[in-house]
Amino acid sequence: MNETYYLDRGNLNLEVNETELYEGVLSGRFSLEDTICQEGWEDWRMVGEVFRQWTLPSPPPRKKNLIRFDLSYGGRTSWINELPKIIPGGFLILVGLSSWSSGEPSSVSFGQIVVGIGASLLVVSAYRRFSTRFIIADGRIEATLGLVARKQNSIKLKNLRAVEMNQGFFQRLLGVGNVGFSSAAGTTADVNFTGISSPSKLKLEVEDWLDESE
């Protein structure tokens, strides 16, 4: 029997029957937590308690976000990371050239040695810069080291499990650092991006990508 109930709507008690209540709950107009009363009842009761026999459709499952932002990166060891070598190297070259230009045999020899040391520091810095290549693209994280003899480390993005960043004292001052990528929990990274600019930004971007992947 479609009995009449009074639905508590604040200052107004709405007169409804079971069919209207059921359709209202389905449409979202009413809730199972709304309270109703009927003549002869001593107190108000929740709709869900009165009509336990109702069969309500299950809410649609939450869809996993399958659309992930495209993660990409390309870079090398930063020139800024090499400043601790570049600055002393440049200074030594200037000192050596000054001594070399004096014309005295002892000063010329000393100047040549100092220039050679300074130039070596600059060559090492340039080699470190141009012999590294760090890429995140096409579903892979890849670090290539070397110009002639090359070493290449890579992992698939889908296998990435952890990303970490570390910075030495001077790296923190210069805003550069190292980012390591691991395919499993552990202390050793599978791929390292060394001496890159804005390492914390890259780390956050990769962590956001991992969150979207879960």
Image (tube, helix red, strand yellow):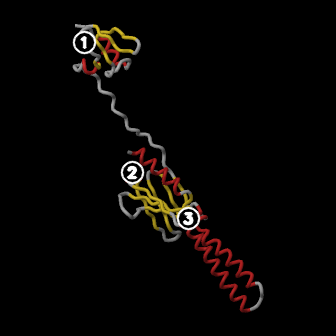
Q: Residues within 10 Å of mark 2 (few under 14, many from 20)?
A: few
Q: Earlier in the sequence, mark 1 or mark 3?
A: 1
Task: Point out residue 137 in the picture as x, y percentages from the top left corner.
Answer: 48, 52
Q: Earlier in the sequence, mark 1 or mark 2?
A: 1
Indicate the amino acid at tag 3: Gln
Q: Earlier in the sequence, mark 3 or mark 2?
A: 2
Q: Secondary structure at mark 1?
A: loop
Task: Point out residue 38 in the picture as x, y percentages from the top left corner.
Answer: 27, 10
Residue at image coords 55%, 58%: 75
| Residue that badge 2 annotates | 158
| Residue that badge 1 annotates | 41
Tell us which disc is closer to us: 1 or 2.
Answer: 1
Towards the viewer: 198 or 24: 24
Towards the viewer: 25 or 193: 25
Q: Secondary structure at mark 3?
A: helix
| Residue that badge 3 annotates | 171
Please say if the residues under marks 1 and 2 sit with CB atoms less than 8 Å apart: no
Mark 1 to mark 2 CA distance (whole Å) = 61 Å
Mark 3 to mark 2 CA distance (whole Å) = 30 Å
Residue at image coords 45%, 56%: 141
